[in-house]
């Protein structure tokens, strides 16, 4: 396909005079959960955040000596204090692309791209007519756009240390415990009598504990919970009509909220 590379089994579902072939792109294979983002007090660029997610998934250098992905340079100029939710790698990339005002897609090389779509695209690349549409179009009236309301997230670390997780675990020697909890920082765990913690790694929503012990033990993780304070930046268009909300956990300052709100407004104004 001109605009990208897709994968299919080659098996078609045939019903009467219609053959349906399902295909997916590389992004849809990225179903593992990204767990390693953290609460941050220093901003990170969306470029670095996207690179973290892509490399964590396990992409390696190809025969051309390149990683099979391309991140637009503009994302090096956009920063965030936000934390990605613990979700699929593919969904994390979509959140980053949305916050950066770029598109997540697979190009005709099979590379995963976070980039603006080309300004000049041939009509035949995207046009849908009676030759390639299997169902008749269904017109839908769309209300004019009144404004775009962009949520701005400001994450604050609470003062008190609280219990984030308590659970009983049956240990038979050395093992790795994977524990989830709500977004927090300054996490720690005090081993119960009879358990040795060989190493521990803490992230915003998750930790890995390398422990040794024999028997049933109660493991408690403590830390400082993160509070999400949300305000709204409004990008006006006209007095009456639809109010379009835009919510992304990586939008953490008013300047970026205004920029992305304007992009969303200009896009929605193109609707017929």
Image: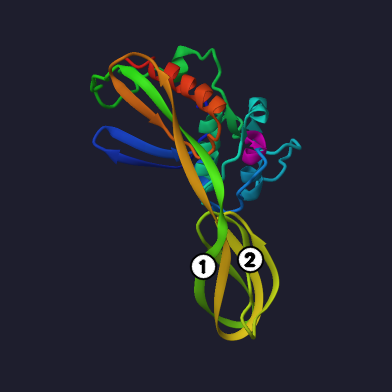
Q: Residue at x 27, y 20 (%)?
A: 142
Specify the quadrant of the image occupied by residue 186.
Answer: bottom right
Residue 170, position in %: x, y?
54, 81
Q: Which residues are magenta?
A: 44-50
Question: On the rendered structure, is 43 left or right of 122?
Answer: right
| Residue 68 or residue 7, whichever sits in front | 68
> Label 2 near label 1: C-beta < 8 Å?
no
Specify the quadrant of the image occupied by residue 72.
Answer: top right
Q: CA distance from mark 1 to mark 2?
A: 11 Å
Q: Which mark is residue 210?
A: none
Residue 2 at least partly seen: no
Residue 13, position in %: x, y?
33, 42
Residue corresponding to mark 2: 188
How packed is label 2: few (under 14 Cα within 10 Å), some, or many (20 or more)?
Answer: some
Residue corresponding to mark 1: 165
Question: On the rendered structure, is 30 left or right of 51?
Answer: left
């Amino acid at each position: 396909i001109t605009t990208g590379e897709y994968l299919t089994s080659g098996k078609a579902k045939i019903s009467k005079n219609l053959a349906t072939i399902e295909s997916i792109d590389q992004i849809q294979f990225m179903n593992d959960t990204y767990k390693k983002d953290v609460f941050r007090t220093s901003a990170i660029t969306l470029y670095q955040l996207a690179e973290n997610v892509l490399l964590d998934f396990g992409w390696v250098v190809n025969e051309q000596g390149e990683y099979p992905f391309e991140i637009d340079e503009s994302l090096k100029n956009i920063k965030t204090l936000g934390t990605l939710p613990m979700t699929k790698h593919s969904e994390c990339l979509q959140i980053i692309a949305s916050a950066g005002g770029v598109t997540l897609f697979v190009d005709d090389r099979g590379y995963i791209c976070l980039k603006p779509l080309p300004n000049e695209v041939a009509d035949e690349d995207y046009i849908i007519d009676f030759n390639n549409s299997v169902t008749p179009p269904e017109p839908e009236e769309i209300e004019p756009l009144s404004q775009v309301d962009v949520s701005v997230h400001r994450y604050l670390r609470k003062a008190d240390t609280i219990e984030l997780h308590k659970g009983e675990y049956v240990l038979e020697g050395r093992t790795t415990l994977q524990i989830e909890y709500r977004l927090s920082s300054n996490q720690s765990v005090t081993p119960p009598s009879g358990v040795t913690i060989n190493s521990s790694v803490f992230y915003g929503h998750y930790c890995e504990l390398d422990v040794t012990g024999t028997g049933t033990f109660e493991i408690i993780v403590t830390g400082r919970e993160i509070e999400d304070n949300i305000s709204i930046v409004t990008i006006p268009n006209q007095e009456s009509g639809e109010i379009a909300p835009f919510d992304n956990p990586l939008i953490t300052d008013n300047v970026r909220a205004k920029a992305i709100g304007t992009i969303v407004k200009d896009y929605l104004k193109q609707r017929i």
